[in-house]
Image (cartoon, grey):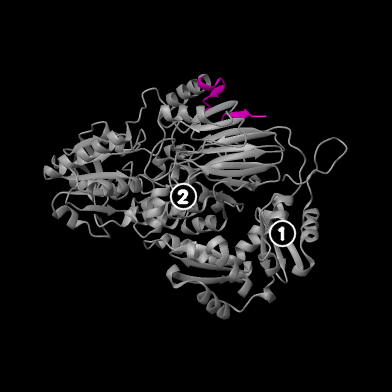
Amino acid sequence: MEDRPVGNGEGRPQRLRADEIFDRIEQMIPAEAGFIKAEFEGPDIVVYLKHAKVLYQDDSVIRNIASSIKKKLIIRSEESALMKPEEAQEAISGIIPKEAVVSSIRFVPEFSEVYIDALKPGLVIGKGGSTLKEIALKTNWTPKVLRTPTMSSDTISGVRALMFNEADFRKKFLGGVGKDINKVIAKSEWLKATALGGFREVGRSSLLLETPNSKIVIDCGLSPEPSIRGGEANANSEVNKAFPYLDSANLSINELDAIVITHAHMDHIGFVPYLFKFGYDGPVYCTPPTRDLAALLLNDYLKLVQRGGGTPLYGEKDVRKMLTHMITRDYGEVTNITDELKLTYHNAGHILGSGTVHLHVGEGMHNIVHTGDMKYGFTRLYDPTDVKYPRIDSLFIESTYGGPNDRTKNRNEAEHELMEMISRTIKGGGKVLIPLFAVGRSQELQLILESYMAAEGQYKLDVPVYLDGMILEASAIHTAYPEYLKESLRNRILNNRSPFESEIFEVIKGEREEVFEKGPSVILASGGMMNGGASVEYFKRLADDPRNALVFVGYNSTSSLGRRIQNGVSEVPLPDQDGHLVPIKVNMQIKTADGFSGHSDRSQLISFVEHLRPRPKSVFTMHGEEQKCEDLARALGRAIHAEGRAPMNLDSIRLK
């Protein structure tokens, strides 16, 4: 914490104890508000009052207290002051305009909160929060507004129901987390980073940060292969290459204070439920969209492994346990995750809710920026990665396309080349299969196709664009979080003109025969690297016909099926309906459309570092093939006259 310094005779500020914080809050609360108690709730502090409306009517008191204690302050009414739920629901329904299209109103007495799901949350909030204030003043319940996605989403419904049903557990859990965070500890004398996975490789990303008093892990993922085959870790098996080196780091999961997630791709989150399976019960920090996308992708992983005859590393109950331990934070929200570590997420521009991680360690001891996966360039979905931070000493940066020859095409040129590939195939009577990661690239391609095919011009094609796999569900989640999207796209969604629901798209649910029986079409299918998913099933049926085309628009890891096909293999063995391997001849056209990756290319990575303010003193590369990590580290070191290194997995680096 950065509370008001108290002298300790040695010139170093002394942080306030919990009882001192609560005493300060009580002293600053007006007597007429009727202070009952203050308590920790995760990283925040909750104050319960007899007459909370006193503070609802004067926001300055809340702001002054929050500024004094350097924490997010939540004001709630004591339980006896709450209007009965049935009466409150009637009152709320009368306050909120019908145009808001409220889909549900749920009361959570454990938190004295009422959750209002609405298609147009702005009308629930009101100008300057006026409608929310009216609800709070009339009912004494604290209103929380959730956006109803414009498209039906089983994932969002499931996650919100889980949070609602587990409110009692969440209350107790957050109370324990808050107490742990606010234990005043001695000043740490050193800071160490250990590479647990994803260094000089792509996959199983994980970084351990340690001080004498704190231990956190940033990301904890699985490699795309061989983890997809499932199975428990085995030191003598190739499967073991899929997991972070948690055991080798001599780290007990019970020692971890927190897990921090940059975004929801499996190579960054895929191992987290495994930790819960074996006893981890601490917090997992992420942005709100990352939580929902994690639920989608982790449950899909379980189904994919089971369909392939494997045994998943963990089960649905472990995923649910992880979700109930997640604490979400928006971009720019400064949060203490231990007494000496402050976390702030910034936009990474990679996928929905992806964040670069800024960590402030100690009282100005050291500052770290961890990019996760990032895009410092144009996309139709997101703004480029943020470059402004309070302070940076050490930068950990991804290197997926950090090699000297990794250059992204001009985006306008890339889009026209893609549409040319599609147009030629369609006019030749063929079908175009585009395998995609369900989250990010799928939505980017939907925006491109909707822009060209639905408008008058040379690429207006009167053929269906089929969506199969998780793409529809992922797109629905995007519509629930338009504030994380580019302004132009956000405005379209808010005005009920979501491009993800364009009439050019046809959703495939279950039966795929109509796609094969009908004429030319474009197929967007989940399974970007073709290690599984809908894309593989379409490939089996389309591969033999030379009129058809397979177009790659994203990264394929070195041992993926997608990379083998991309490299020109003429035949691949794939399982049939009975699980027997059969040879599939590759006669279809294999094409690669560059320029659509959610990762930055080499020039974008260098430009990002050059534009960082302030510039880091040390740069460490990760998340890239070995040679690319090494080469980019040298280039970045030269570009900004800083130390540039490419650590190996299991390397430990003393940062301070």
Mark 2 and mark 1 in contact (Cβ < 8 Å)? Answer: no
Q: Residue at x 46, y 58 (%)?
A: 316
Q: Amino acid at mark 2?
A: Tyr
Residue 198 position, x and y percent, is 48, 35
Residue 423 position, x and y percent, is 17, 42
- Element at label 2: helix
Looking at the rendered image, the disc whose residue lies closer to the viewer, 1 or 2, is: 1
Question: Mark 1 or mark 2, which has the lower sequence index?
Answer: 1
Q: Which mark is residue 61?
A: 1
Q: Is residue 282 magenta?
A: no
- Element at label 1: helix
Q: Which residue is mark 2?
A: 484
Crowding at mark 2 (Cα within 10 Å: few <14, some 14-19, many 20+):
many
- Does the image show residue 40? no
Q: Residue at x 51, y 68 (%)?
A: 116
Name above or below for residue 93 compared with residue 487: below
Q: Bounds of the magenta span?
A: 639-656
- Does the image show residue 482? yes
Name above or below for residue 374 compared with residue 72: above
Q: How far apart are the two marked residues, 1 and 2, measured between alpha carbons?
A: 30 Å
Q: Amino acid at mark 1?
A: Val
Q: Residue at x 20, y 34 (%)?
A: 570
